[in-house]
Amino acid sequence: MHDALSGARLGDLETMTPQFHSGQTVRFSSGLLRRSAATGDYQIIKQLPDVGDEKQYVVKSALEPHGRVAKESELENVSA
């Protein structure tokens, strides 16, 4: 289905909207390639440009002195 005003498909709007925002607390699943990542909660620092169809973010753990780049699929919302 197309939006009459913009010509965009309505399903595309969902993929364009970021799932996370700056300051939000998330859990980072580092996977096998990044085992050195700190466990626990991370804070979203900022959103980066998309890579292909996936959004990226800079995330920071209080347990590490540096931030990390994480794909949206590697992050999980942490309920307050």
Image: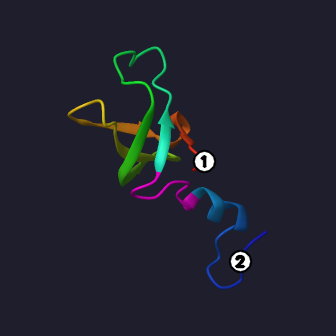
Q: Are marks 2 and 1 in contact (CB under 8 Å)?
A: no
Number of labels in the image equals 2
Q: Residues within 10 Å of mark 1 (few under 14, many from 20)?
A: few
Left or right of 64? Residue 27 is: right
Q: Which residues are magenta?
A: 16-24
Give the residue displayed 71% in from the left and 77% down from the top.
3
Q: Nearer the viewer, residue 61 or 7?
A: 61
Question: Closer to us: mark 2 or mark 1?
Answer: 1
Type of amino acid under label 1: Ser
Give the residue displayed 22% in from the left and 35% down from the top.
66
Q: Secondary structure at mark 1?
A: loop
Type of amino acid under label 2: Asp
Residue 18 magenta-highlighted: yes
Q: Nearer the viewer, residue 15 or 35?
A: 35
Instruction: Tell me residue 41's x, y (percent).
Output: 45, 36
Query: Which of the colour schemes (rainbow, by chain, secondary structure, one colour) is used?
Result: rainbow
